[in-house]
Amino acid sequence: MRTLIEHAQAIAILVDAASSARGVERASLVDGPLPTGRTLADDLVAPIDLPPFPASQMDGYAVRSSELVPGAPALVVAARVPAGTVPAPLEPGTAAPIMTGAPVPEGADAVVPIEQAVPAHFLPEDVAGTVELPTGAAPGLFVRPPGSDVAAGSLLFAAGTLLGPAHLGALAASGLTEIDVRSPLRIWLLSTGEELAPAGPLPPGKIHDANGTSMRAALEGAGADVTALRVSDDVDALWRALAEARRISGALPDLLVTTGGISEGAYEVVREAFEPRGLTIGTVAMQPGGPQGWGLLDLDGTAVPTVCFPGNPVSALVSFEAFLRLPLLAAAGRPSPRRDSVAVLAESADSPKGKHQFRRARLDDEGRVHFVGGASSHLLHNYAMSTVLAHVPLGVDRVEAGDEVVVWALDD
Ligand SMILES: Nc1nc2c(c(=O)[nH]1)N[C@H]1C(S)=C(S)[C@@H](COP(=O)(O)OP(=O)(O)OC[C@H]3O[C@@H](n4cnc5c(N)ncnc54)[C@H](O)[C@@H]3O)O[C@H]1N2
Ligand code: MOO
């Protein structure tokens, strides 16, 4: 029987293999959904300086700083320089009214804010006049140098950069309209069970498919592109469902994730179908989530990394937290949550000594751990009401109020 850590390491290697086989796709910065949260496929070199020209940082007067010396005469007001225009060079002895973001005229090397001018407002455009400005403006005052944000030819963003709003804005500012991003990990999520009914009135003995939705949300939340499939306990139906998914998508997935059908019953469809095709169905010393399957599944001669979780909805989600979440975030280039923290138990609990137990719990205002519901793995609503998973490690069969335990945040 594998320990939690041994299994986590093995699954991380499997996901890493799945991830390295991923492709690259073109993403538009102009049409359709933006590639927010995706990662750059290649290093990108800055095609232009940002800003592209020396620009004013203030509404004010563009001047030659050398002319603002004690005793100098008032400067003649030159033509206005609005943003988006190309100004004429600045004549000696003049000051050009300039707006924030406008190109600083050739010859000017500083901008004096309008508040410091006398008069402290712009003259009407058709009125000739002079302006008095304080002395001592340093060269470069309130001028944004070209390339001061990023210089043309320098590394704009490195391959693997996770694209957030500022990255996308900088790419747009650089004039790029399309970029190459890593394709998300394509996962087929297969919910199995004769008892699973589609949404609608429940026939006797049937239940609705919780895992198809909870696991899809979990996998998508970690950056994967998920195709959800559902099959009964019939092995032939399972193969037909996989063949149909392949026909529709035109390819096999990077990773196959299943729920259900791997324990000791008489109708374990995943075990029956996948064990002869290269998968190991075994047990990890944890609760919930004991039954687990893993390996490379032979699908028409292609080895598809595959992870099989137990069908109990809490077992499947806890398995996701323990084995898939961090490797998937890493594959998506996303930062991992800081998970391990220590908290004090508000109540006692028993735990199977030979298993690492995850209890669903909430923290109170003092940060103490209160269990939400029992240890059973069908208690999905209790899981939803929890904010942490509290760990009772292997070898411990009882924890008391006041004991410290490790907790993983579920709401980060
Ligand atoms: N004799 C033994 N019986 C069981 C053992 C064992 O060691 N010996 N292990 C138990 C544990 S622990 C778990 S966990 C489950 C895992 O069984 P399977 O992975 O084969 O899952 P199923 O039997 O298919 O389903 C278990 C449970 O979960 C419900 N389920 C399944 N899929 C869904 C879904 N998509 N949405 C909602 N609920 C689902 C299913 O109806 C069952 O109630 O085995 C124990 N048994
Ligand atoms: O391992 Mo099961 O997941 O205990 O319910």
Image (spheres, grey):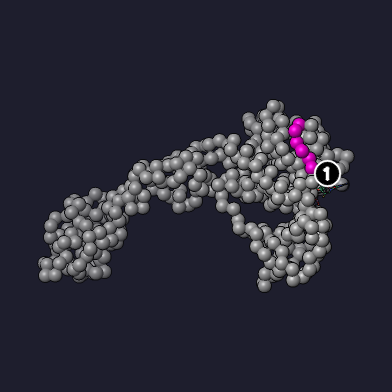
**Magenta-span inclusion, residue 393:** no
User: Residue at image x 71%, y 69%?
Assistant: 344
Q: Badge 1, how many Cα within 10 Å: few under 14, some, many 20+?
A: many
Instruction: From the top left corner, tell me how far across and down residue 282 is, in percent.
Output: 79, 42
User: Residue at image x 12%, y 67%?
Assistant: 72
The answer to whether the residue bearing label 1 lies less than 8 angstroms from the nearest atom of ligand 1 is yes
- Up the image or down, 275 lies above or below 100; here it is above
Which residue is at the front of the view, 149 or 117?
149
**Helix, strand, or loop for circle 1?**
loop
- Seen from this angle, which residue lies furthest top? 301
Quadrant where the C terminus sits is bottom right
Taking the image as shown, residue 204 lies to the left or right of residue 370, namely right
Is any part of residue 335 visible from this angle?
yes
Which residue is at the front of the view, 310 or 85?
310
Which residue is at the front of the view, 82 or 334?
334
Instruction: From the top left corner, tell me how far across and down residue 374 is, in percent.
Output: 81, 61
Quarter assignment of residue 67: bottom left
Instruction: From the top left corner, tell me how far across and down residue 169 is, in percent.
Output: 43, 50
- Seen from this angle, which residue lies furthest right? 266
Q: Which residue is mark 1?
A: 263
User: Residue at image x 56%, y 52%?
Assistant: 335
**Magenta-span inclusion, residue 278:** yes
- Up the image or down, 342 lies above or below 239; here it is below
- Up the image or down, 226 lies above or below 126; here it is above
User: Residue at image x 14%, y 55%?
Assistant: 91
Which residue is at the front of the view, 233 or 8?
8
- Seen from this angle, which residue lies furthest front? 395
Instruction: From the top left corner, tell me how far across and down residue 362 is, in percent.
Output: 71, 65
Q: Which residues are magenta?
A: 277-282
Q: Given the image, on which type of amino acid does mark 1 rest?
A: Ser
Q: Give the number of marks.
A: 1
